[in-house]
Amino acid sequence: MQPIPDGEFTLRLFPLPNLVFFPATRLPLHVFEPRYRQLVSEALATDERIGMVLLKEGWEGDYYGNPPIHPVGTLGRIEQSVRLEDGRYNLLLGAEVRFRIVGENEPAPYRTARAIAHPETTPPAVEAWGRREWLVELARRYLEMLPGRMDVPELETAGLEALTNALAMSLNVPAAEKQGLLELDDLLVRSDRVASLLEERLEQAEFLGPFRRETDPNLN
């Protein structure tokens, strides 16, 4: 695996309208558009890296052109790939680091950019441990209220970055709000925001609990 460049580097871009990819997470991806099939083919032949970015609002009128994108994205490395008979791909991306776009190149046929790595601020170990324990407790309570809840063994082993970012990806909030979380440089600040979102959902669940029990006999 090639190291991430220290300075500016050229990056293949995969813009999507409703997905925000976070460092220290994994993403299954189905690739079917011809331009992105070529992107994947060329990535597999070289550094195996793809830059995942979010399209800005209003992308619908120019999806097949070059609609505006957010300047901060996440660099994904192809960990697994399956090429289907019709040329489509199923991929598993592992997130390496955030990047910031400093300029775009002419698309041919997919978009590329000049980018720099943009890592997050790493908190001191003691602060990271305390914040992780808080998030684990909130996540357990949140999972308990979901239908068909299941155990998530990763809660016991994930570090603060992986836990915070996995929760951020899984929360049912607008993509623009997730993009805002991604753009927070301080991991502690992001974990605070994710914790607040979990607390809001727990408070809503507690408030709605009596009404749900009245309408659903299985909850009584």
Image (cartoon, rainbow, N blue to C red):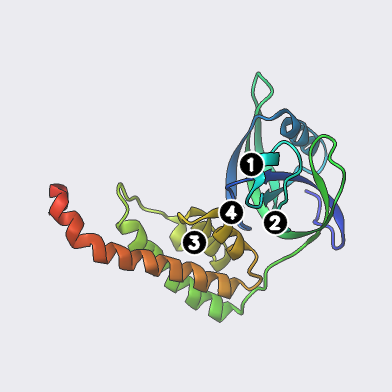
Q: Is residue 58 left or right of residue 101?
A: left
Label located before the other in sequence (2 or 1)? 1
Callout 3 amino acid: Thr
- Picture coordinates of residue 128 (x, y %)? 55, 75
Return the mark for residue 25. 4
Mark 4 element type: loop
Mark 2 element type: loop
- Picture coordinates of residue 193 (x, y %)? 51, 70
Callout 4 amino acid: Thr
Eye-nearest disc, 3 or 4: 4
Q: Please report contact status of discs 1 and 4: CB closer than 8 Å, yes or no.
A: no
Eye-nearest disc, 3 or 1: 1
Q: Please report contact status of discs 3 and 1: CB closer than 8 Å, yes or no.
A: no
Instruction: Give the residue pinned by disc 3.
Output: 157
- Picture coordinates of residue 204 (x, y %)? 31, 64
Eye-nearest disc, 1 or 4: 1
Q: CA distance from mark 3 to mark 1?
A: 40 Å
Return the mark for residue 51. none
* Residue in the picture at 48% in, 78% down: 130
Q: Is 91 above or below relative to 95?
A: above
Label located before the other in sequence (1 or 4)? 4
* Residue in the picture at 69% in, 45% down: 15
Q: Toward the viewer: 72 or 85?
A: 72
Label located before the other in sequence (2 or 4)? 4
